[in-house]
C-alpha cells in the first residue's frame, strides 16, 4: 500500500487513533452488526445498493470521525477513532445520511435546511446521543440529554458546511426540528 493521504506507513508512530488497516478491519466487523445490516437492506430497498468500496477507512485532517459524500460514499477516520464501537457508530450515522440521500431525489447538501434535517435524523436514530455516550463525553445531564446532544452535534456539523453560517445553521435546525426529529424512516420508531 502506498503512503498517501488515505494511508500511513506501517512504521508510523501513533499519535492517537488506529491505522487505516485496523480501521478497515473494524468496518468489516461493523458490517455484520444488526443495525448496519438493517440500514444496508433498506438502502437497497430504496434503490441504492452499496458496493464493497462504499465505506472506506482513511486518515482525516481536522477533528472529524467520518463523513458521507453523495456519489462518493462513506469515509471513516482511522486516526480519530480507537475502538470497534466508535467505528460502528460512525458507520451507522453515515449510513443514515446515505439513506436520506437515496430516498430524497432533491436533497442538496449545500442547503443548510436539508443538511440540518439529515443531521437531526442521524443524531437521533444512530444512538450517537445515548446517555452512556454522553456521560463518557462529560455531559452529565440526565433529563433531556438526548435532544440537547442532537442539537449540539447538528450545529457542529452544519456550521462546518462552508455554505452555512452559524446563524443559518441554527435557523435551519429550528425550522425543521419537529418534522425531522420525528421522521424515523427506515425504522418504525427511534431505536
Image (cartoon, grey):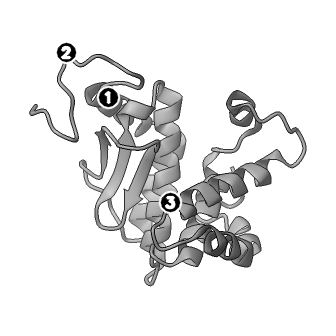
- Quadrant in the picture for residue 184: bottom right
Residue position marked by numbered label 3 in the rendering: 160
The 10 Å Cα crowd at callout 3, few under 14, some 14 to 19, many 20 or more, is few
- Quadrant in the picture for residue 62: top left
Query: Is residue 170 shown left or right of residue 114?
Result: right
Q: Out of 63 and 56, give the one closest to the viewer.
A: 63
Q: Position of residue 46 (x, y in %)?
A: 44, 70
Residue sitting at x 21%, y 29%: 8
- Examine the rendering and report whether any part of residue 3 can be seen: yes
Residue 18's place in the image compared with 121, above or below, is: above
Q: Secondary structure at mark 2?
A: loop
Single out the residue that lies furthest toward the left: 2
The 10 Å Cα crowd at callout 1, few under 14, some 14 to 19, many 20 or more, is few
Residue position marked by numbered label 1 in the rendering: 25
Q: Which callout, 3 or 2, points to the residue nearer the camera?
A: 3
Q: CA distance from mark 3 to mark 2?
A: 33 Å
Q: Looking at the rendered structure, which numbered label has been put on residue 11?
A: 2
Q: Position of residue 144 (x, y in %)?
A: 86, 49
Query: Is residue 93 shown left or right of residue 16?
Result: right
Query: Is residue 80 shown left or right of residue 19?
Result: right
Residue sitting at x 45%, y 84%: 106
First in sequence: mark 3 vs mark 1: 1
The 10 Å Cα crowd at callout 2, few under 14, some 14 to 19, many 20 or more, is few
Q: How many marks?
A: 3
Whether pointer 3 and pointer 2 mark residues with C-beta atoms closer than 8 Å, the reply is no
Q: Out of 150 and 29, give the one closest to the viewer.
A: 150
Q: CA distance from mark 3 to mark 1?
A: 29 Å
- Examine the rendering and report whether any part of residue 190 can be seen: no
First in sequence: mark 2 vs mark 1: 2
Residue 168's place in the image compared with 34, above or below, is: below
Q: Which callout, 3 or 1, points to the residue nearer the camera?
A: 3
Q: Out of 183 and 154, give the one closest to the viewer.
A: 154
Amino acid at each position: 500500500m502506498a503512503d498517501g493521504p488515505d494511508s500511513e506507513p506501517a512504521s508510523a508512530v501513533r499519535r492517537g487513533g488506529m491505522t487505516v488497516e485496523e480501521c478497515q478491519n473494524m468496518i468489516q466487523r461493523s458490517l455484520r452488526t444488526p443495525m448496519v445490516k438493517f440500514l444496508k437492506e433498506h438502502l437497497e430497498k430504496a434503490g441504492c445498493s452499496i458496493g464493497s468500496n462504499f465505506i472506506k477507512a482513511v486518515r482525516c485532517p481536522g477533528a472529524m470521525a467520518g463523513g458521507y459524500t453523495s456519489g462518493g460514499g462513506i469515509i471513516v477516520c482511522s486516526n480519530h477513532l480507537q475502538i470497534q464501537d466508535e467505528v460502528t457508530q460512525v458507520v451507522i450515522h453515515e449510513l443514515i445520511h446515505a439513506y436520506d440521500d437515496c430516498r430524497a431525489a432533491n436533497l442538496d447538501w449545500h442547503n443548510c435546511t436539508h443538511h440540518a434535517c439529515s443531521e437531526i435524523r442521524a443524531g437521533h436514530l444512530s444512538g450517537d446521543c445515548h446517555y452512556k455516550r454522553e456521560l463518557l463525553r462529560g455531559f452529565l445531564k440526565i433529563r433531556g440529554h438526548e435532544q440537547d446532544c442532537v442539537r449540539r452535534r447538528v450545529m457542529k456539523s452544519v456550521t462546518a458546511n462552508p455554505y452555512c453560517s452559524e446563524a443559518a445553521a441554527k435557523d435551519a435546525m429550528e425550522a425543521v426540528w419537529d418534522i425531522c426529529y420525528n421522521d424515523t424512516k427506515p425504522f418504525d420508531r427511534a431505536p
